[in-house]
Amino acid sequence: MLDILRITSTPLAGYVAIAVPWLAALMVVAYRRHVRIVGCVAAGVSAVGCVLVLGIVAPGQSLYPSVMLLYSCLTLGAMILLPQRDCSPGIVGGMLLLLGSTLLAYSTDNLLILLAAWILSAVPFFVPRWFQAQSWRPRAGLLLSSIALGVAVALMVAGTHTTSIERLQGRSPGGPAAFGLLVAAVILRKGILPAQAWISDAAEAGPAVPTSLLFSGHFGALLVAKLIVPPFAGATASFFPILSWLALATALYAAIRALAEDSPRRLLALVALSQSASILAGLESRTAEGITGALVHWYVVAVSTVGLFGIVRLLEVRFGENLTTATHLGLAQHAPRLAVSFAVFGLALLGLPGTLSFCSQDLLIHGTLQSHPLTGLLLPISTAMNAVSVFRLFTRLFLGRRRTGFTAVVDALPRERWVLAVGMVFVVLGGLFPNAFVARRSAEADLVARATETKHARMRH
Amino acid sequence: MTLPQAILVSVVLAPGVVFLLLALAWLLGWTPGEKLITRLTGLTFGACAFGLAALLWNVTEAHSAGVVVSFGNWFSVQDYHFPLVLLADRLSLPFLAMTVLLCGLIGQFSATYLHREPGFFRFFVLLHLFAFGSMLAFAAGSFDLLAGGWEIVGITSVLLIGFFQLRPPPVENGLRVFGVYRACDIGLLVAVFAMHHWAGTAKFATGLPQLFGRENLIVCLLLLLAAAGKAAQVPFCGWLPRAMEGPTPSSAVFYGAISIHAGAYLLLRIQPILAQSTLASGLVILAGMATALHGTISGRASADAKTSIAYASLTQVGVMFVEIGLGWTAIAVAHILGHATVRTLQFLRAPSMLHDDHRMHSAIGEHAAPAGTQAEDLLPESIRLWLYRWAFDRGHLDTILDLYVIEPLLSLSRIFARLDRAGSRGGD
């Protein structure tokens, strides 16, 4: 049982990081008091566990532990940022379940455990009181992706009689059928064309902050890095560019789709989808720049997405849930700090110099253009359109004459201010001094790059 | 690090540091008063001006090609590097001096002009960020770094267009300008990639990347796209009159002086490789001539002073593009410096133009005689009417952009939205 986690040779801290959120989720649902405190403590303990794990692994092996740390910190931040109205046992319990499942998926070396974590992370979205979407598509997307992964895992296990992911490297377990199903799972879970619609449906109808955490788990990218690229190196070289083209097409589709969108939540979901699709394209680029850019971008997109959704939720709580970009709302006069935070996270998502995404976009564009000179051009084009959409959202929400109908409303509360400040410091300091951060991701990218070093790649070189 | 290198670094960083300090103070809940902001601005740009004077003296005395400061790589991944190199040579020094002097001047002017304006603090914060972005772009020793400064200039420009944020039109115009900037900046980003790909570097501190034939042409065309967008050349010039929604001091410093000339600076920087391609040079000349013609015709039908000055500015920048395309770089630099100074003065005097006119009438005791026969009077009336309509709609460029780019994109977006929502029960 102990070999299910490959994050370290002494996995106790890893177990604590995963188990504590689950125990806390049960406690929150059963005890139903001091919900935020329990949630914060559990996410904090989980983050400390991840730090301990990260402290003992070699830099080249730190890919998953560092993403685990990011995710636990994100959950902690989201837990603090969560408006009082949303701080119910169900929501917090669901977030903690999501945290534990995501960390388990990142850390495990076992196919069955990965499948279980994948399914568990989707469970909260099937609880009607938690996820009140009228649309069937979010649940269908999550369910179908789980089925596709389940069948793929069954084929892989049946073909190789092993559940260890490490032992599957380069063996193409389960053959083309398993490969196809894994790609289908990625497409469905990540919202890649033609399965993109559930993402914006989920963002519109689901609880904003937890849904952004679901997006920020980037399970699709995880599956690519962990279960597609290493075991299917041969097939990856031949067929994987198709997924890359689909990802680039998704990036462009979502960017165009966002241009005329009036719902802030849908718009943000589309921009986040467009930006996160480029992560897949970077991972597939099979260049050091592209893969490193994808890994750095993973961090930036996750932090910015949770930050932006968090701010939109805070605005909804203060100004009503019928926010729209059809008109200028002038909310900056009431909430200038939320406006500035929104601008920083928005620009950080889109590659403003001085933020970490400037580096990640730079690397991503270089890597993708090198790998696909023509289709790679879609990436800067979609980023430019996303920038226009986010700027439009910012101007419509925050600029213009203030709305009447409500009296004095508070700006960001101290706890919200601190969380947003930490997020902004991360993206800005990371952008000003990116070398240490990029170097670490570069070492991690070598892992993925080595796995994709196939006959095709050697021919290219 | 030698003294000239330290001075160069300090001059470039100073406005950025002031921006960070002011922004941090505000985030912590303290907004500095007008007097303090004005003094800090004066001190910053004053010190920068002294520093640049010393640097200029040093370069002239030592007969050196310039000062280069290399900080190594900002970040690197295997063979790909993002070099952090600053360069103050005989091309960038005049631009740096122009930026420091005019930003300092605008700072002092705005202290009075924007006195008690609710956005006083915001204006000065953005002015410092703009100055930092401009100096980064002009002092960059690589196209990677230049792109960084270029983007900062763009975003501050847009935020200042929407300075009067309570009125929707400035905000909407800012969004439009932002869209054009982003679209054209794709050229710069892809050009930087192409340089890395074909020449192995985008650094120019020690000589421009070696590019030949088709590769050279592609890079030049991509950079021309970026330059044309920033310098509001045809067919991207529809944003310029919209940018006049910003406060007059920002219009002066952006569209009279610095931002509008950034495109010309980029072309001057790549002039040696531009000269290798007859087609690229020809296109630069063509864009410049078309813009000059468009500017002078459209400016005549402009109803307000700032837009007229903006079109006059556009005409001159078009002429500068022609000069650069013809290889007359020294003339282009002199033209830029002179034009920036005169145009800034014109913009700053624009709000008091009527007052000035009345004072002049009072001084001479009667109305001044008309300025003389206009050249268009020589044309037949039917052509004049056609030209008037053409000028009134600003060459139909915005209409064309709306019809053939924006509307199709929005229609496509709406079609995608309908497709997305088609299968969603209860979808809005």
Image (spheres, rainbow, N blue to C red):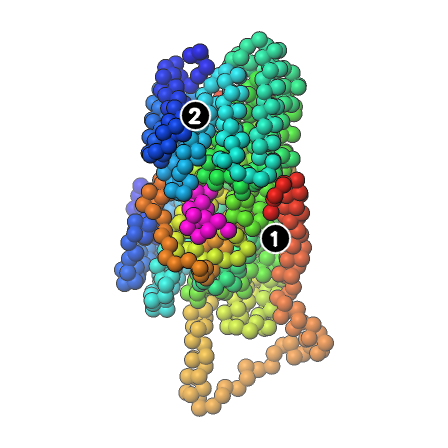
Q: Quadrant of residue A455?
A: top right
Q: Residue at x 38, y 42 (%)?
A: A84
Give the letter of the chain under mark 1: B
Tell me which amino acid carries mark 1: Ser
* Residue topped by disc 1: B281
State the quadrant of the C terminus of chain A: top right
Residue B232 falls within the magenta-colored stretch: no
Marks 2/1: CA–CA distance: 60 Å
Query: Looking at the image, is B415 positioned above or below residue B362?
Result: above
Q: Chain under label 2?
A: A
Residue A453 shows which numbered tag?
A: none
Looking at the rendering, the stretch of residues picked out in magenta corresponds to A307-322
> As displayed, is residue A147 above or below residue B375?
above
Name the residue beneath numbered marker 2: A100
State the residue at coordinates (62%, 15%): A155
Residue B145 visible? no
